[in-house]
Amino acid sequence: MTAPLVVLGTGLAGYNLVKEFRKLDSERPVVMITSDDGRQYSKPMLSTGFSKGKDADGLAMNDAGAMCETLKVEIRTFQQVTRIDSQQNKIFMDDDALEYSDLVLALGAAPINLPIVGNEYLMHVNDLMDYEKFHQAVQGKEKIVVLGAGLVGCEYAHDLASASYKVEIAAPDAQPLSRLVPDQCGQALIPALQELGVKLHLGKAATKVEKINDGLVVTLDDGSELVADVVLSAVGLRPRTDLAKQAKLQVNKGIVVDRHLKTSENNIYALGDCAEVAGFNLLYVLPLMNGARALAKTLSGQEVELQYPVMPVMVKTPSLPIVTCPPQDEGQGNWSIEGQTPHLKALFKDSQGNLLGYALTGECVAEKIKLNKELPASWYK
Amino acid sequence: MAQEHKKWQCIVCGWIYDEAEGCPEEGLAPGTAWGDVPEDWLCPDCGVGKEDFEMVEI
């Protein structure tokens, strides 16, 4: 009997890969292994769940059993893979081992744990089970401090404030979304968040979290203190690379793969947040979906190179929608900004006037499709 | 005879395009059939393209 295709991870990357693969090959045995319960859900929806009144069960689309049937695969839940032996084509779990014909690492990325005193009190929401814990922790509570003003921090603050929580954001950044959009566009989000009752403490990093009576106190680096029932940390993600490192695969920021998503070892591939494709580690939905489609083809025998199309990032802050296609290299041109706050159109062009990136806020987001066509067709080369 | 309107769901985020309602804020008038939605149209919630939508029976 031939060994199965083995996929580690049942997040968006793992499930979408197998879904695409099954369109091309309905026969080959596939085993999926996950450290969680294997429920299928949509990660982007984790940051809009509160305003839609959904708990974790409400966000789950299918359980592991239903996914086994739909995808015609075996799914092993609550399994930790401890080691890969790339010479023998085998993976090892706590008390089992499994041979693979091809192995796909769809391990995702883990939340960065801030190195501050009291970080054991911080909560993270990076998957459905985290969401479940967080959702339970805030029931009957009122005050939530969000650490981080990037995409996830802003989306959570917006979502929680829309669901009537008292939210404060603290972040060392001078304005929201500082790594995704030009300053003026990030600043446009401030009044939108304030209108929902969010208080922002920008330019201030958290230095300490303490438990006092029933609540938590977050100390910022200017000495000020924020009182909270729950503190949510959204300060960034780090690709999960430990397993790959231990197997001596080439690892940089993520697990290094070529445009066939192949790692430095034969028959081992990596996809999604854990992968660094031709130098780019992109922790968004669109790169992952494009990767899943390309890898499904390669695994079914029609080798294809992954070429990224234009991939805008949507920021889910409904009171001020934002969409951005950040330029790959800020040194290659300049931003120019038109419009009246909060409706801004920021264009990033090189000296010849070629569009290389954009950020749109408010009513200007309607122009995204037109601008996508003006961007270079092939992205992240 | 009234045309039968279908619903299409984004497989990534669950957002639903209802042909009957269209999506006026995205410039798609009520009654716009899925086939007439531009190929470069993007899911308003998560940004994936038309190929990541599937027809749903609701």
Image: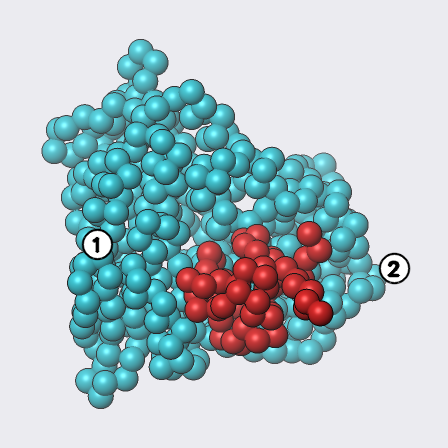
Q: Is residue A75 left or right of residue A374?
A: right
The chain coloured cyan in the image: A
Which mark, by number, is residue A1? 2
Where residue A176 sits in the image (x, y, percent)?
25, 50
Outermost residue, left side: A222
Residue A351 placed where, x, y %?
19, 85
Q: Position of residue A303 (x, y in %)?
A: 65, 78
Few, some or many C-alpha atoms within 10 Å of disc 1 (few <14, some 14-19, many ≥20)? many
Looking at the image, is mark 2 or mark 1 nearer the viewer?
1
Q: Numbered disc 2: what chain?
A: A
| Image: A94 above or below A358 | above
Q: Which residue is mark 1?
A: A188
Q: Nearer the viewer, residue A375 or A58?
A: A58
Identity, as a three-letter code, of the amino acid under mark 2? Met
Image coordinates of residue A305 in percent, x first then y, are 56, 77
Q: Which chain letter matches label 1?
A: A
- Identify residue type, mark 1: Ala
